[in-house]
Amino acid sequence: MLTGLDDTVRLANGVEMPRLGLGTYKSAEGGDVEGAVTAALELGYRSIDTASLYGNEEGIGRAIAAAGVPRGEIFLTSKVWNDEQGYEHTLAAFTRSLERLGTDYLDLYLVHWPRAETPETWRALERLYAEGAVRAIGVCNHLEHHLEEILGYADIAPMVDQYELHPWLQQPSLRSYCQAHDIVVEAWAPLMKGRVAEEPALVAVAGNHGKSPAQVALRWLLQHGVVTIPKSVHRERIAENGAVFDFTLTPEDMTAIDAADRGHRFGPEPDRGGER
Ligand SMILES: NC(=O)c1ccc[n+]([C@@H]2O[C@H](COP(=O)([O-])OP(=O)(O)OC[C@H]3O[C@@H](n4cnc5c(N)ncnc54)[C@H](OP(=O)(O)O)[C@@H]3O)[C@@H](O)[C@H]2O)c1
């Protein structure tokens, strides 16, 4: 078991969320995803991120059921996809996600992309939260102006914003905005989609600490107060990505990585609602 994977941040409503979990985008149902979740839980991961889009919720549910880790010890996140948005559609999508995952609640349910229907979608999430079907609710891919809008009409403010964040796309003002509004920032693509070794600052800092560029990229996020969910389907990499609680980056290391920002997006522009 790795140490530190039970480290948590406290969401605005007091729920504790692990600071590092397993991402599963492109981890395929019927093989890869089951193996990845099984390995992660064995290694001590207690947070799993999925989405109805990923088509792997059933496999994740099977792996969790087989792992023997009590459901209450696992922080399970899923997301409502674009074509499921709207009040009734979202409620139905949530039920389908629960069925596929083989659980009767989620720890976190997220709006996958900002869309025209998001105000109705958000009302559905507020209802699910009020009914106790989900322990926390939040959004993904919301820029400051999307958050301003949602904070304008929400009865319950988003507790998390999960968006693309790594050394090449830092968006410091969005991070400050979230932190000022008690919205936990969760980074996707924390490993720059596997391209961490192409960033000289990560390679240099890694060399100084006897760690890998991937581990340094994750540590940099954690030290900025950001939650993250690196994805891998390989046990040795899942172990590597989880072994980031036994070293600390210096202020100089942090500054060197802060300077690597180049506004490079791997994913779609949030203003396009997830469409490329
Ligand atoms: N809300 C959203 O819109 C959104 C969008 C995208 C992603 N996400 C979530 O965020 C998670 C993470 O993002 P991501 O999967 O896009 O990208 P990522 O975690 O930055 O990168 C994953 C890639 O890095 C490779 N990798 C894993 N560990 C590595 C290591 N130690 N060294 C080098 N390469 C390594 C993986 O390959 P192997 O698997 O072959 O090891 C995979 O190709 C997703 O899985 C998903 O759960 C959310």
Image: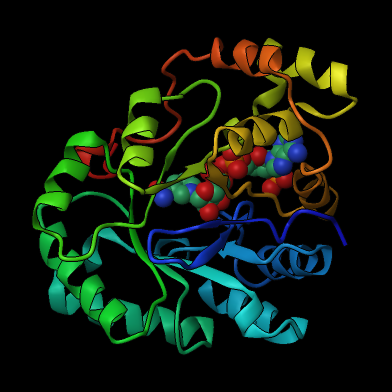
x, y (%) of residue 186? 48, 46
User: Can residue 56 be seen from the camera position used here?
Assistant: no
* Image quarter hosting the N terminus: bottom right
Asked whether, in this view, residue 156 is left or right of residue 27, the answer is: left
Q: In which quadrant of this rendering is ligand 1 seen? A: top right
In the rendered view, tell whether residue 42 sits above or below residue 93.
above
Please name whichever residue, 218 or 238, is drawn nearer the observer in this view of the structure. Answer: 218
Residue 143 in sight from this viewpoint? yes
Which residue is pictured at 29% across the width and 33% down the height? 269
Compared to residue 265, the image places residue 236 above or below, namely below
What's the residue at 43%, 83% (across, down)?
98
Left-right relation of 161 to 107:
left
Q: In the figure, 121 relative to 68: above or below?
A: above
Q: Nearer the viewer, residue 107 or 265?
A: 107
Q: Position of residue 83 (x, y in %)?
A: 22, 63
Rendered location of residue 91, percent (x, y): 24, 80
Give the colour scheme shown.
rainbow
User: Nearest the camera: 226 or 105?
Assistant: 226
Q: Quadrant of residue 243?
A: top right
Q: Which quadrant is home to the C terminus? A: top left
Give the residue at x 51% y 20%.
168
Q: Say which quarter of the image contains residue 205.
A: top right
